[in-house]
Amino acid sequence: MSKLLFDERPLVILPSLAIHLGLNESIIIQQLHYWVNSNGKTKEGHKWVYNTYEDWQKQFPFWSISTIRRTITKLENADYIIVSNFNKLAIDKTKWYRINYDMLKGLNSPSVQNEQSMCSKRTVGLSKMNKPLPESSTESSLIPYVEIVSYLNHAADKNYKDSTKSTRKHIRARWNDGFTLEDFKKVIDTKVAEWKNNLDMDKFLRPDTLFGTKFESYLNQNMSSKETQTPSGPAPFSYDINAGEDWE
């Protein structure tokens, strides 16, 4: 028998749930249901579980962090899951999750009396999931726009704003790809060392260039300090009349 069959705890896919929510969404919410019931922490009368996106990826190693983030955000925007923060430290931004079981009831076969209202809720929820996702305030607080742009301005002697839509779009795209704050700083340091003293290249020390599609190649570039040396000419000729042969 193949070792790929049941050697590890399988994920559950309920076809009827996948039809309503989408395949990725149904897998995540089913896994969330498992953890809420097996290891949930009671807060405000509900059971919650908390995880970072990196922790979720350990359970879904076949997905990128950006896919997991996008799927969870869709479920949150459609009100199928509730997100909060019960961490003791204010700097701890780890999210807490619980399932909105009231919304899921609308996915069952409702009675004639409440079928219309349930279908209305479901239609609104699914329509939200199909729309492009705006940047949520929670996600915005997780992405260190200010620190990244401030670091660039200080290193490159620039004055870019962290609130510019284009700047945020590029930073958010790379952040959703799974890159970290240290990765951004390394790219900035590498390209500043290479371009800052070059009049032709200094203009490219800007967010849309540094944080664009070449970000990963910049990240893997070896940073080297190149000293510009001016070739020296030949040493001036000198003749010492006292250095000749001795004459008797």
Image: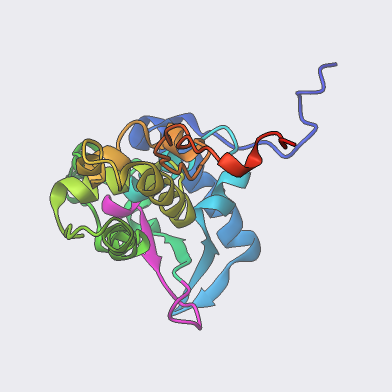
Residue 10 at least partly seen: yes
Q: In the rendered view, would you say 91 is above or below 216?
A: below
**Percent from the top left, x then y, of residue 159?**
17, 60
Placement of the C terminus among the 4 image quadrants: top right
Q: Nearer the viewer, residue 49 or 192?
A: 192
Residue at image x 48%, y 36%? 235
Going 60% across and 37% down the picture, which residue do you hit?
61
Q: Position of residue 119 (x, y in %)?
A: 21, 43
Residue 25 drawn at (x, y percent): 41, 40
Residue at image coords 48%, 43% = 65
Furthest residue in direction front, as rendered: 248
Residue lying furthest right in this view?
A: 1
Q: Is residue 83 magenta?
A: yes
* Displayed quadrant of residue 142: bottom left
Q: Residue at x 38, y 42 (%)?
A: 194
- As drawn, 127 above or below 5: below
Secondary structure mainly formed by the magenta segment: loop
The residue segment tinted magenta is 76-92
- x and y percentages locating residue 213 in the rendered image: 33, 31
Residue 158, by quadrant, is: bottom left
Please tell me in which quadrant of the rendered image residue 112 appears.
top left
